[in-house]
């Protein structure tokens, strides 16, 4: 299935009936058997994923056809087990039907957990945006072996790729200057047609390379929140940092780890429509941010610049051109940098 390991694990837990839903919990605890979203009905998997008003608005607002609740059988488990069969008229080119359905119910589940444990209400439209970002990113990974996961040896050859239509991308890089115990941070914001929108340079006090990268990721998350955009991808080439942010096993020190809570808080910022996803890329795809971070010397405190400094023109043009060559035949990615 074209989905992240965490989404796959979630599907497995559903099929094994391992989710901690209230319908099960209330038998052993004093938790009432009420749906976290509507408090009207018993919370079963069938209810929270399909029949609840909240779930129905998610499916209704999604671009999926046919309307999944109409294709579900007697139970969510049966529904998952027959998802490998595409509905009539489904074109696999856009991505897997199964992956889309699983990612959607996974985000519904995360919204349910947010509601229960953090008191955060999620907008059904946000669930669709999150699903769409993850689903298209995973479909791209699966279809282009050359842009595969970090463990893949082809990964080193990946070029910078435009984010999906309507999405912006921030590339971040952090470099640790051991001599001055300084972190040099660079962020580059580009739109879905590859145009550079703004660049940002900062310095901070850090004591390791991972800490510099983590601070860069945090600055990217802060910026993403400020941008007031509906969908943003944040991309860096430090695999360990992205793993840490996604909650996967990783090897980073406690000083770098101490910034995770702030990053997660930015990701889940309440009352904000901004939705963003962290992605890993190789150093080549992140070369513009790395080049900018290298030039973030002691004269820089915090700079936001547009147009970007002239030494970046070449590398930004190269990124756009390679991206355009990769996507030849499709109508997107026409303009390229510098064209402001
Ligand atoms: Zn409900």
Image (tube, rainbow, N blue to C red):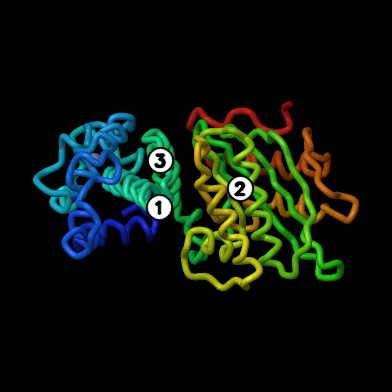
Q: Is residue 50 left or right of residue 254?
A: left
Q: Earlier in the sequence, mark 2 or mark 3?
A: 3
User: Looking at the figure, which quarter contains the C terminus?
Assistant: top right
Q: Earlier in the sequence, mark 1 or mark 2?
A: 1
The secondary structure type at the circle numbered 1 is helix
User: Looking at the figure, which quarter contains the N terminus?
Assistant: bottom left
The secondary structure type at the circle numbered 2 is helix
Using the numbered discs, state the Cα–Cα distance from disc 1 to disc 2 in whole angstroms. 26 Å
Give the farthest residue toward the left: 74
Q: Nearer the viewer, residue 167 or 300?
A: 300
Q: Residues within 10 Å of mark 2 (few under 14, many from 20)?
A: many
| Residue appearing at x 49%, y 66% in the figure | 151
- Which residue lies under the disc numbered 3? 121
Q: Earlier in the sequence, mark 1 or mark 3?
A: 3
Dot 2 beta carbon under 8 Å from ligand 1: no
Q: Mark yes or no: residue 288 visible.
A: no
């Amino acid at each position: 299935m074209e989905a992240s390991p965490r989404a796959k694990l979630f599907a497995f837990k559903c099929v094994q009936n391992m989710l901690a839903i209230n319908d099960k919990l209330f038998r052993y605890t004093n938790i009432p058997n009420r749906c976290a979203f509507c408090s009207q009905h018993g919370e079963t998997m069938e209810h929270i994923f399909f029949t609840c008003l909240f779930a129905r608005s998610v499916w209704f607002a999604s671009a999926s056809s046919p309307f999944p609740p109409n294709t579900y059988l007697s139970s969510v488990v049966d529904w998952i087990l027959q998802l490998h069969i595409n509905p009539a008229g489904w074109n696999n080119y856009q991505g897997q039907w199964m992956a889309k359905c699983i990612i959607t119910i996974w985000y519904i589940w995360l919204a349910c957990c947010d509601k229960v444990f953090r008191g955060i209400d999620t907008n059904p439209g946000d669930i669709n945006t999150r699903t769409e970002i993850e689903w298209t990113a995973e479909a791209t990974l699966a279809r282009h072996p050359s842009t595969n996961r970090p463990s893949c040896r082809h990964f080193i050859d990946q070029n910078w790729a435009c984010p999906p239509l309507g999405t912006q991308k921030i590339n971040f890089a952090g470099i640790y200057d051991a001599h001055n115990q300084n972190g040099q941070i660079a962020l580059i914001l580009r739109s879905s047609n590859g145009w550079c929108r703004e660049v940002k340079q900062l310095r901070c006090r850090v004591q390791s390379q991972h800490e510099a990268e983590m601070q860069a990721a945090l600055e990217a998350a802060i910026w993403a929140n400020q941008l007031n955009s509906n969908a943003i991808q944040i991309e860096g080439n430090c695999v360990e940092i992205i793993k840490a942010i996604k909650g996967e096993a990783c090897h980073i020190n406690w000083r770098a780890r101490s910034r995770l809570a702030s990053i997660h808080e930015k990701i889940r910022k309440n009352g904000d429509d901004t939705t963003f996803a962290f992605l890993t890329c190789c150093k080549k795809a992140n070369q513009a941010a790395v080049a900018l971070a290298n030039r973030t010397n002691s004269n820089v405190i915090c700079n936001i610049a547009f147009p970007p400094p002239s030494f970046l023109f070449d590398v930004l043009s190269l990124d756009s051109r390679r991206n355009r060559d990769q996507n030849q035949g499709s109508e997107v990615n026409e303009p390229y940098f510098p064209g402001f």
